[in-house]
Structure formats: C-alpha cells, structure tokens
Amino acid sequence: MRRIGIDRGAALLVLAALVMIRLLDPVPVELLRLRTFDALQTLSPRADGFRPVAIVDIDEDSLRTEGQWPWARTRVAELVNRLAQAGAAVIAFDVVFPEPDRLSPGLMARTIRPLDAGVADALETLPSNDATLAQAVGATRVVLGQTALAQATTGDDAVPQTGFAVRGPDPSAFLAEFPGLLHNLPVLETAAAGRGLFTIIPERDGLVRRVPLVMIAEGRMVPSVTLETLRVLTGSGTILVRADAGGVRAVALPGFEIPTDASAAVWLHFGAHDPARFISARTVLDGSFDPARVAQKIVFVGTSAIGLLDNKTTPIDRSIPGVEVQAQVLENVLSRATLSYPSYAVLLEIAEAVVISLGIVVLAPVLGALRLLVLGGLVALFIAAATWFRFTQFNTLQDPTFPLLASFGVYAVLMFSNYTREQMGRQRIRAAFGQYLSPALVEQLAANPEKLRLGGEDRTMTIMFSDVRGFTAISEFYKDDPAGLTALMNRFLTPLSDAILDAQGTIDKYMGDAIMAFWNAPLDDPDQEAHACAAALAMIARMEALNALRKAEAESGGHPVLPIDIGIGINTGPCVVGNMGSDLRFDYSVLGDTVNLASRLEGQSKLYGVKTILGASTAAAVAGRFAILEIDLIRVRGKAEAERVSALVGDAETRASEAFRLLEARHGALLAAYRARDWAEARALLDACRAPARALRLDRLYDLYAARIAEFERAPPPPDWAGVYVASAK
C-alpha cells in the first residue's frame, strides 16, 4: 500500500509540473497547440460559397504590360475609375503611396536635364499625377492602405483620422504597438474615405493565423485596412472597442460585433487559395474584364507578383498573396466565420487534464494496463471528437494536446510502477483496490457523449407573450432617428428580459418590440405559473420606473416623451418543447395550442384595459397567492371553445388590501348578474365597483362592461347566449 501511495504521489507531482508548464506556455507548447489548430483547418477549411470580395491583382502579366511597380498614379487613377464605373462598393488598397509620383509633369520638369525651358514651363503647369489620383479617390469610396514601422514617425494632424470609442478599460496595453506608421501622401489620405493598416503579424513559426483589427501606431489606435473597409461600407463614423480587465473582447460597427482575442486580433478560418478571387489589373486597365465580377463587391487592390514580396503562409497554403489574407479577413467577418480561442480555454484544458489524470490515478490499480489503455483511447477519442465538434459547429478552438499529453504522462508514471510490481502479484493488487471502484463506473466514464438531435418532448408549460402598446406611434416619433429607436428598444427590452430571467423563465425569442418566454423547460419548474405571474408584475413595475426616468429626462431636456405601456398574456397547458428546425439549423423552442392562446390573450389585454391576462389553467394554479379577477368568457379567433380569462391585478399584498377584497366580491356579483342578463343589477354593481377599481387602475375594464350592458339593453343577445364574448381581432 505504501508503494501505491508513492506511485500516486509521483503521478500527482508530474501532473502539477505539467500544469505549471502549461501556465508558463513555453514556445514548444504553444507551437504544438498552434499546429493542432492548423490540422483542424486543414481537415475542414472554410467553405468558399460566400464571395463578397474581389481582388484586383497587380500580377506578373500586369507588370509585363504596364511596366515595373510603382506605376504612374494616372494609371492607378484609371484603375480606380474603371472599378467605380463597374459598381464596386468599396475599393481598398493593399499597397501604399508614400512618395510623390516621379512621373508627375512637374517633377519630370525638374529632374530631366537638359530640357527646353518652354517645355519645362509647360510641364510645370500640368496637374500632378498625385492630384489626378486624389481626384479619382475622392470620387468614390476608397480605403488607402498604410503599414506599421519599427521607427518612430509623426503623423500629419491635418489628415483625417478614424474615430474610436472604448467601452470598458483602456485596451492599449493589450494591442500590438508600433512606434511608426508609413502614410500615403497627405493629398491622397485627405481625399480617401478611409485609411487602415495592412500590417499582418505572423506567429512565431511564420504562419498567419490571426490578423489584428486594431493596433497602436504613432501613439494612437489605428484600424486595420479590413476593419476600416467595413467601417466605410457601413457608413459608420466611429469604431467601438469593447474591453474588460483581460483585454479586448470585440470591436463593433453598426450591424457587426466582431469577437476578438485580447489583442483585438481575429482567428481566421481560412479557405483554400482560389484564383477565381483574382482579376488581373491589366484586364481592368484595358477594359477586357467582366464588370459583374466587381459589381456591388468590396474590391481589394494588391499584388501576387513574386518580386513585390507580399506572400504569406497560412495553415492550409504554403504561399498566398498578402492581399488574399485581407480578403479572407473580410469574408470571415461578413459570414461570421471567424474562429475563437476563448480566454477561459486554458482553464478548460487544465481542468480536462486534471480530471482525466485523476481518473487514471484512481482507476489504474483496478483496470490494469491494457484496459486502462483502452479506456484512455476512448477518452482520447472523446476529447478529439469534442474538439472537432466545437470547431465545426461553433468555430471554437480547443487544444486537445495538453489534456492528452498530461494524462499520458500520468499514465506512463503509473504504468511504469505497475510493470515493476507485476512480478509481486498483479491479482493481489487488483484485489486490494477492487473494493473502491466498480466496472459500472468504468463503463459510465467510457460512454459516448449524447448527441444533439432534432425533436421535442411533451410538457405542461407556462407561456408568456408581452408586447408594447402603440409601438407604431413610438416608431413614428423616432422616424428621423432610427438609432434613437434602437437605443430605446434596448433600454426597455433589457429590464423586461431581466425580469423574466430573474423569475427562472426562458426567453424563446424577440419579435421586434415583443417577447416570447416560457417556464418549465429545459429545467423542471414545479411553480411555473407563480414564477410567470411574478415576472409579469416585475415587468410592469420596471416599465413604470423606466417611464418615470424618461419623463424626468424629457423635462430636464425640454423635449416630449411617449410613455411605454406593455400588455402581457400568460397561459398554461400542454406543449411540445425541444430543438425545432432542420438538420442544418435548429433552435430550442415550444409549439402548441397553449402558445397560440397565450399570444391571443396578450392581444386582448388592451381591449379589457388590464396589463396582464391569464388563461384559466394559470389563474387556477395561482389562485390564493395573487390578486386575480375573472374578467370574461372569451372565444378568440382560431378556437371553437371559450376560455375563462382573468386579470392579474397584483401580488399577495395587493390581494390582502381592502380595495381588492371589496372589488373582488362586487366584481363576482357583477359577472353573475351580467351572465344572467339582469342588466339593471349589473349596472348597479358596476357603479359599486368603480371606486375600488379606480384605486387599482381598472377603470377601463368597467367602461367596457358599461358599454356592453348599454348595447345589450338596446339589442338583447340571442337566447342561446352564455355570456361568451367572441373576439374579432387577434
């Protein structure tokens, strides 16, 4: 037993040492992890179906035709004009124009000697080639490339700069930083719609796996050329950087939130090099290209020419042009295909290694070398499958090598000890430890993970629908300020959602200003009806608080404000809940007649002048715990049977109030007289209800019944009328 204790202790020491190595993350460990990520991309490269980017290539053929690079800026201007005429959405340059064009007429006049004075004067009067290019750049949406420098430089304050907003702590310490920046000529940068870095920072082994979207150059934040292109495309004036204590989490533009690593870089899911992306610059200049290949696309201008030294190595291609990397960045972002290596991944990998290794330490004395090796193989397959599943289904990177190597190291230590003790009696050792573990536990650990599949289960569930009343008027109020409308929606949907989640509800979906939620799935909730009612009351209270705050803001700002009023429908009954959709895309959702009725009840809340309407099953389940009034027998559109519906007036405190107890008794008598066609008695009871109803803000309910009674007095209902109201609207 002592030797077994020593063996286990040695295995645990090895495990602790390996965990420390992983935390230190030396170069060999990092490279092994990166090579594993490369293998995932090699096995499953990004599909090439989505092509929003075209590349105009300064290729060998173009250099043979037009001459060595750089070309005259007038030719580059022709290139820009032809692309703009073909309908390019944005033109971005993966090259930089830092010096004046040596072929400009004025420069030629000053450099060619001897030159006739009249010719020199004539050349001096001609516009510079740089001005010609600036005019072309200014006539369309062009993003000029810049590159980072290791030498300090100073930018021109007169040149426009891209604005940044930071939400969270200053992320500068986490960003790649360069002291200098190689700019384009000021006349070009002033004319351009945007400016961004095409600098790509390879990993230690020279491969490009990540591309930074934001960097520090000349002491300020600068966007990459791809991020700047996206900003120009969306028409945004500012780039938002979301950060926390661990660094950058995402960069955002209108309609896009791009998750990044802490240094604001995106992990790319590369597609294979594809010549179909490329259009020779020669064909653009001579007009022989197909304009449809660039129409409504982002066009990058770059080079694949070997002599211009802009080739990169990726996990799936030994050499591709650097401009194609930029194109793939945009394709990744626009198709939301970027990979993520979450900040918690290291802890997850260490936790896996510790759990598996401890399992080996515990199971080794019982299973022996062969069966433990088989079990280890199964666990390794599980880890590999989980890694593959995360990569292919969620674009998430996970390193399987450390858990496998750590557990194998522990296994090797224990197996070495087992081999040295084999002559002392393997069966005796098994017998000594057999009492601690059972074969059933081994089988459980080796079981395959449960797979996601389509289908659902039958459950009794409580469904809630909430909607903003009069949202059309609110939208019209913000017709000239769509950003303000979006901010307002976020402002009221957030507290409404929080109220549902605080009451253990599940939000199914948002439908504009409406919310659908449910209880009793995926986790059992034996008090689902009460939780739904508590959520409804909390939602109403939070909207009242928000309206009060907005009113105070409006008064201080001297502008009008429209209050937000919500209606809620809640119903309980049998449903089908589960993963609904297709084999390619599905969501966890709920279906059934109960859902449809809940939606209809929400639509009737405005008619009855109450905030929340409950179906019969919900009301019966919470009777005695909440202030509830039965308000009608109603047959909604699409249903043949009438439903007894109630209003949720308040919580237990409201139920105990004098006003509610008085109203409850009179209201019940009112309904009885109404359904008995005793209109005079019903009218008298209705008048008696008004005073307590006013305290509970139920005035409109009694206005509705007053109108009905008056109508029935003029035109009595048919003999078979049973007090059922038939709803004409949803």
Image: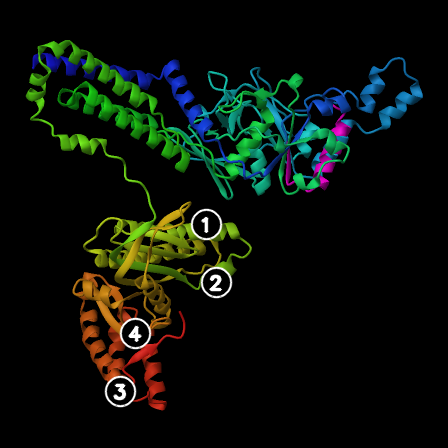
- Mark drawn on residue 677: 3
- Mark drawn on residue 472: 2
Amino acid tagged 3: Arg
Q: Residues within 10 Å of mark 3 (few under 14, many from 20)?
A: some
Whole-number angstrom distance, CA of label 4 to CA of label 2:
32 Å
Please state the horizontal and vertical placement of residue 219, each as a whole percent of the image: 53, 23
In the image, is 358 to the left or to the right of 494? Answer: left
| Foreground label between 2 and 1 | 2
**Badge 4 is on which residue?**
641
Q: Secondary structure at mark 1?
A: helix
Q: Residues within 10 Å of mark 2 (few under 14, many from 20)?
A: few
**Badge 1 is on which residue?**
487
Above or below, 213 against 501 in this view is above
Q: Which residues are magenta?
A: 71-92
Please state the horizontal and vertical placement of residue 363, each as a whole percent of the image: 16, 23
Above or below, 58 against 84 in this view is above
